[in-house]
Image (tube, rainbow, N blue to C red):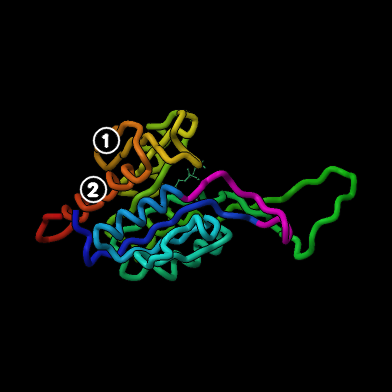
Amino acid sequence: MDLSGRRVLITGGPTREHIDPVRYLSNASSGKMALALAEQAAAAGADVTLVTGAPAGDAGSADGDFNVVQVVSAAEMAVEVRAALTGVDVFIAAAAVADYTPAAPSQQKLKKTGEGMTLQLEPTQDILRSVAQGPDRPAVVIGFAAESENLIDNAAAKLEAKNLDLIVANNITEPGSGFGTDTNRVTILGRGDYRVDLPLMSKWAVAGAVMDEVARLLGENSAGGGS
Ligand code: CTP
């Protein structure tokens, strides 16, 4: 597959939503899937930017094959995605973005009181939805769905609700699949009942399969066809 001349923007990793300067809400995403996607897209010749919440060192690309923008929170990720969006052909949201963030994070370290406490949370912006439904929508927009039940139905609903071209669905309760592993077993869903069930494979190989789909979709979109 050849993606030369194409611009690809990828989100990856967890976000951290700070409660105070030392404590945060986060999740177990390693950023490995997004890293594999960035490497595969760069290997196919694309101009790639990875916006990631994965810790430095896990984020990848010391060798300059693609650009890495390191972020902490969902709000920062939204800002950096928006800043990088102009001219992008393909947007892939592989990040495990926090859906909620503390409404009033403390500037100082919170002290224990011996009492219980309640943390007020407010929703974050859905980055994928705002890109897919926004005025600068790239030609191809792909989301990920990490589900623990009703995999296909939930993923198909997200494909529709977020106006995506493809969704990569994985069941995080399956052995070898999901957060932190080097492997993944995914089902790729597209518009009009398009469905590809892939076997358990390395995240690198899953990323290659996703890039094949990207090339196919770009080929369908371009006047001249081909990929
Ligand atoms: N996503 C995003 N911004 C958010 C939340 C999610 O860009 N604030 C993206 C993820 O990167 C992923 C897709 O949306 O590609 C699915 O995210 P998920 O959290 O599974 O779906 P939700 O719509 O948040 O639904 P729920 O948490 O109820 O499963």
Residue segment shown in magenta: 18-31
For this view, does 168 lie left or right of residue 106? Answer: left
Residue found at x 58% / y 45%: 27
Mark number, residue 195:
1
User: Depth-wise, is mark 2 or mark 1 nearer the camera?
Assistant: 2
Main secondary structure type of the part rendered in magenta: loop
Residue found at x 50% / y 42%: 180
Camera sees residue 128 = yes
Camera sees residue 135 = no
Q: Where 139 falls versus 212 (above or below)?
A: below
Q: Quadrant of the C terminus?
A: bottom left
For this view, does 123 lie left or right of residue 204? Answer: right
Element type at marker 2?
Answer: helix
Q: Percent position (x, y) of residue 157?
A: 39, 38
Q: CA distance from mark 2 to mark 1?
A: 14 Å
Q: Percent position (x, y) of residue 85?
A: 38, 67
Q: Where 47 falls versus 96 (above or below)?
A: below
Q: Which residue is mark 2?
A: 212
Amino acid type, mark 1: Arg
Please state which of residues 72 and 106 is positioned toward the viewer in this rendering: 72
Q: Residues within 10 Å of mark 2 (few under 14, many from 20)?
A: some
